[in-house]
Amino acid sequence: MSNDLTVVEQGALALPEEKLFAILESSLYPGAKLESIALVVNYCRAAKLDPLQKPVYIVPMSVKVGDKFVKRDVIMPGVNLYRTQASRSGGFAGVTEPEFGPMIEDNLQGVQITYPEWCRVTVYRIVNGEKCSFSAIEYWVENYATASRDTIAPNAMWKKRPRGQLAKCTEAQALRKAFPDIAAAPTAEEMEGKYIDVTPTDTPQLPGPEPVVALPACDHEKFDLNLAAGGKMIRAGKKTAADIIAKLSTLYTLTAEQKEVIEALPGPDAEREPGEEG
């Protein structure tokens, strides 16, 4: 018999839309606007994610338009989504516990707080059969969220969990470095308390060539395939990392992190795998 319990086999997106919206509004996104919940559902459909696992957040952001600030809901991934994507890639090989720098005692506009100066996290990824490390270090003062735009005092969460919040931001950065093909946008943890400036510029547009249409991003499946093939050619001495980057750049828009991964591939002097050409 087919009923709403098919969600167990087909995922939350198998529910009737109005029922799914009601569940999300009452449990995961209380008080959110229906149009914002619709954005979450569409995001999850496109990425084949279960919205009941809350892979993304509805973040109320202050958006600067001209000389005014307006409140808008922005859909942002959480660090747990990055973890899920890294795990699905098949190349994830672990992550270290966060390492913290010395504790700093400070008074930020009347708020007494003790926080770690910095945090370091390392993510491991299998690249071309080798376990590679990608480390990130983030500083508390450069990441913490303020209580409002008009104060430098931290908000309640960053005051209560100075290490935990910084660790999430640092792990997100490390995951972006290790998996640039699946992690690009800043996470909700990183953007909390920030604002977005979408003020149009008044700079006149000078005559010039037609704008170039951006090439599509190189998703993790395509990147991994090209990385494996390119790695073999580099080790065989047939191509250089620059050659591989130049070739892929005619097909895709590579991120700086993806280029760094290619540049880190071992050269002709590295030990060849069995079956590779000499």
Image (tube, rainbow, N blue to C red):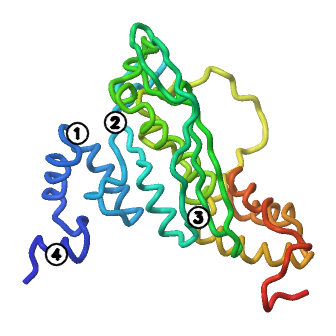
Q: CA distance from mark 1 to mark 2?
A: 9 Å
Q: CA distance from mark 4 to mark 3?
A: 31 Å
Q: Nearer the viewer, residue 107 or 264?
A: 107
**Left or right: 196 in relation to 248:** left
Marks 3/1: CA–CA distance: 31 Å
Disc 3: which residue: 219
Check if mark 2's residue and mark 3's residue have beta carbons within 8 Å. no
User: Who comes first in sequence, dot 1 or dot 2?
Assistant: 1
Please state which of residues 26 and 36 is positioned toward the viewer in this rendering.
26
For the point 79% across and 66% down, which residue is it?
Answer: 265
* Cα distance in 3D space between marks 4 and 2: 31 Å
| Residue farthest toward the bottom in the current orientation of the protein | 275
Q: Is residue 183 above or below residue 106?
A: below
Which residue is tagged 4? 6
> At 78% across and 73% down in the image, what residue appears?
230
Crowd around label 4: few <14 · some 14–19 · many ≥20 (10 Å) = few
Around disc 2, counting alpha carbons within 10 Å, would you say few (fewer than 14), some (14 to 19), or many (20 or more)? Answer: some
Quick one: label 3 or label 1, which is nearer the N terminus? 1
Amino acid type of the residue that numbered disc 3 sits on in the rendered structure: Asp
- Amino acid type of the residue that numbered disc 4 sits on in the rendered structure: Thr
Q: Residue 79, position in %: x, y? A: 44, 49
> What residue lies at 56% left-to-right and 50% top-to-bottom?
184
Identify the element where label 3 is drawn.
loop
Name the residue tied to disc 1.
33
The residue at which mark 2 appears reads as 73
- Mark 1–mark 2 CB contact (< 8 Å): yes
- Residue 159 in the image: above or below residue 84: above
Task: Tell me which amino acid carries mark 1.
Answer: Lys
Among numbered discs 1 and 4, the one appearing first in the sequence:
4
